[in-house]
């Protein structure tokens, strides 16, 4: 028989790395009547979920596929530090009242006030739009590996089946 048979179960992984990003996509497939894609990926990749589904649908017709995505961002970041001056003054005043109430000096009061939540906040530039192509390439590699495993397992099952006939 020359018909290519594929197993319904399998595993494939793909990794794509650039100077800025490293993405690893792993796909685990099990038998299921219809196609069900269950992505487990970083929240920042949510906008690309439909792209992932389209890539998978172009290669797989049925089964349950768990897709795990690991993302490392090595890009140079920009940070914005913000000081909530009103909150800092309020904390410092409160610390002064505590020091006065216990008749103690307000040593390191500024540092203590700055340590409270919300006084100093840091916002990181989170633009990872350049990672989309890296992500989809890793997904394509994982699908390629999954398909190869399913073909190998399918050939093994077909051979075993024919041997038993």
Image (cartoon, grey):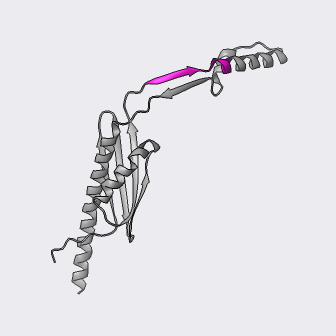
Please provide the residue range marked out in magenta.
Answer: 78-88
Q: Pick the residue in front: 49 or 134.
A: 49
Evaluate whether residue 87 shows in this view. Answer: yes
Quarter of the picture containing the N terminus is: bottom left
Q: Pick the residue in front: 111 or 92.
A: 92
Q: Residue at x 46, y 44 (%)?
A: 43
Q: Is residue 35 left or right of residue 115?
A: left
Q: Residue at x 24, y 72 (%)?
A: 5
Evaluate whether residue 112 shows in this view. Answer: no
Vertically, is 105 above or below 25?
Answer: above
Vertically, is 16 above or below 85?
Answer: below
Residue 112 location, quadrant = top right
Q: Pick the residue in front: 74 or 131.
A: 131
Residue 15 image position (x, y, % from top left): 31, 46
Quarter of the picture containing the C terminus is: bottom left
Vertically, is 84 above or below 130?
Answer: above
Q: Is residue 9 left or right of residue 163?
A: right
Residue 10 part of the magenta segment: no
Residue 71 image position (x, y, % from top left): 39, 42
Q: Residue at x 62, y 21 (%)?
A: 84
């Amino acid at each position: 028989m020359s018909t290519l048979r594929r197993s319904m179960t399998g595993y494939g992984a793909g990794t794509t790395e650039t100077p800025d990003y490293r993405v690893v996509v792993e796909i685990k497939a099990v038998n299921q009547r219809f196609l069900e894609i269950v992505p487990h990926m970083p929240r920042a990749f949510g906008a690309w979920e439909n792209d992932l589904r389209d890539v998978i649908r172009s290669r797989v017709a049925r089964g349950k596929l768990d897709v795990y995505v690991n993302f490392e961002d090595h890009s140079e970041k920009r940070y914005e530090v913000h000081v909530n001056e009103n909150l800092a003054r309020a904390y410092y005043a409160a610390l002064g009242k505590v020091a006065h109430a216990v008749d103690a000096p307000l040593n390191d009061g500024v540092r203590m006030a700055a340590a409270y939540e919300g006084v100093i906040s840091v916002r990181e530039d989170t633009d990872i739009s350049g990672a989309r192509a890296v992500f989809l390439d890793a997904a394509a590699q994982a699908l390629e590996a999954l398909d190869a495993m399913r073909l190998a397992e399918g050939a093994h099952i077909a051979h075993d089946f024919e041997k038993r006939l």
